Image: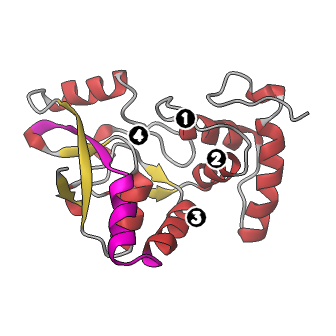
Amino acid sequence: MKTLKIDQLRPTQVTHGMREIRDKTKAYRSLTGHDLEMAIAEKPVPVVLGPGGAPFVIDHHHVATALWRADVKRVPVVLVSDLSSLSTAGFWLTMENNRWTYPYDAHGRRVSFTDMREHVWELDDDEFRSLSASVRDVGGYEKTAVPLEEFRWSDFLRRNLPLPENDAEFDALVRQAVKLAKSKAALGLPGYLGPSD
């Protein structure tokens, strides 16, 4: 399987969840040798080649960032599409049409593609992105193959819950968010499970 240096990978989103990255980084740092190699091989990073042949990450931004923070320099990649022949404008239009990019900041506001970061580890922290992952991890909704599902959940939670100011508030918010995720208000979101019996 082909590998690329993590510092070559270009992000296609503006935010990520630092809580999730810290947890993943800690997990990767706890592994050595064959165990670390297997963990890295489990999550190849899907990329699309853009203008100039630059590899743009369309999933696993958190994985790539956590590995970089754990001093891993290269990751296996899977080529999803080669759009290197397109103009910059045509590239981003195609990326958006395929739902391979999410140009929104931590407040849910659209940003220009020219404001995309250069490296995966430079993304802004979005507490609601971490919250959506935590809610999924404790069974608030199911993981699906729907592109950008975590961001749809993040935006839903952002509209309905206050921004946590510290770890205790975040932990309390997870419980509220799970209830909200299983309510009728979340009907239609990917992985929706409905009320618990």
Mark 4 vs 1: CB contact within 8 A: no
Using a 10 Å C-alpha cutoff, classify the residue at mark 4 as few (fewer than 14 neighbours), some (14 to 19) or many (20 or more): some
Graded by Cα atoms within 10 Å as few (under 14), some (14 to 19) or many (20 or more), the crowding at tag 1 reads some
Q: CA distance from mark 4 to mark 1?
A: 19 Å
- Residue 67: which quarter of the image? bottom left
Q: Which residue is mark 4?
A: 111
- Say if mark 4 contacts mark 3, CB within 8 Å: no
Q: What numbered label is drawn on residue 114? A: none
The answer to whether residue 119 of the structure is visible from this angle is: yes
Q: CA distance from mark 2 to mark 4?
A: 21 Å
According to the picture, the residue beneath numbered tag 2 turns out to be 132
Query: What mark, if any, has residue 19 been given in the picture?
Result: 3
Q: Which residue is mark 1?
A: 149
Give the foreground label among 2 and 4.
Answer: 2
Q: Is residue 122 above or below residue 10?
A: below
Q: Which residue is at a point 27% across and 23% down the rendered structure image? A: 94
Q: Which badge, 2 or 4, comes first in the chain's sequence?
A: 4
Q: Looking at this rendering, what residue extends furthest in the front direction?
A: 34
Instruction: Give whichever of discs 4 and 1 has the lower sequence position.
Output: 4
**In the image, residue 26 above or below residue 90:** below
* Label whose residue precedes the other's in the sequence (2 or 3): 3
